[in-house]
Image: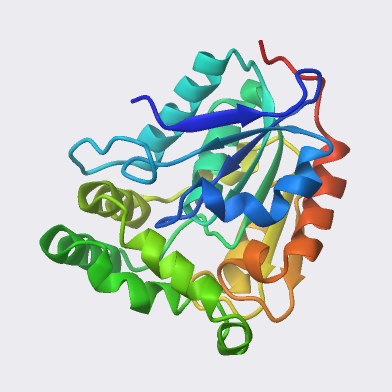
Amino acid sequence: MRLSATLNGPRRAPVLILGNSLGTTRELWEPQLAGLGEHFRLLRYEHRGHGGSPAPAGPYSVAGLGADVLRVLDDFGVEHAAYCGVSLGGMVGMWLAANAPERIDALAVCCTTAHFPQPGPWAQRAATVRADGTAAIAEQVVGRWFTPEFARRDPATPARFVATLGTVDREGYAGCCEAIGAMDLRPALPTITAPTLVIAGSEDPSTPPWHGAVIARGIPGARLRVVRGSAHLANVSAPGEITAALTGHLRAAVRPSSAA
């Protein structure tokens, strides 16, 4: 798999990989680009079927999605980098940190989980999307990404994400759903050695803070930060707080850039 990806920023800066959530594209990270771009060379990729990435037939696995990212690193000549991911992007980041530790200098995961106890809803969502497309679920899913207060204050932002989700390839989305439903990263957490920051949204109905607490307890030395008043896309609803937290954590842990 060759994913759609971009690498931008000063060549001498350390590389930071940014992984998007299920149903979003690299545009998810726009609130952080200016702040993180002052310190890092930003590598943004898109999961299978998202944005410009192709969508092979499913089912997928988190291991397969992680291998896609390793291919991206190889294509750009990046030997090692920091990694930050939201939701599915965070799951891929944890897999990378556990299975390719020499490639991941530091890790930050936001509004994510190591395991969903009930895989059934993911199988059902995959079936719905294969039958009716991603537009059929867009309003319902995006409704979980922002608090009602945020949606009333800034209705254009949820509307933009609804439109984006409707463009995601149905097979790519369904395959990623199946990967999430089958995933259990909990046994791998104690093997992660990269310095790790775990961020959770206090009002996140998709991955409530207890999911983040499980990750933080499982990874040696990991820290948990709960962002008050934010739902599943905390980096969008609380951009300044998230950017500052990521910058402080990642700058302290990264090694000099290895990018070609």
Occupied quadrant, residue 146: bottom right
Q: Position of residue 102 (x, y in %)?
A: 65, 21
- Residue found at x 40% / y 36%: 65
In the image, residue 94 above or below residue 127: above
Q: Position of residue 66 (x, y in %)?
A: 45, 34
Looking at the rendered image, the quarter that the C terminus falls into is: top right
Residue 153 seen by the camera: yes
User: Is 145 left, or right, of 168 in this rendering?
Assistant: right
Q: Report the front residue among 216 and 13.
A: 13
Q: Report the front residue among 181 and 109.
A: 109
- Residue found at x 80% / y 30%: 254
In the image, residue 166 above or below residue 26: below
In the image, residue 8 above or below residue 166: above
Looking at the rendered image, the quarter that the N terminus falls into is: top left
Q: Position of residue 209 (x, y in %)?
A: 63, 72
Q: Report the front residue among 142 and 87.
A: 142
Q: Report the front residue among 187 and 75.
A: 75
Q: Position of residue 256 (x, y in %)?
A: 82, 20
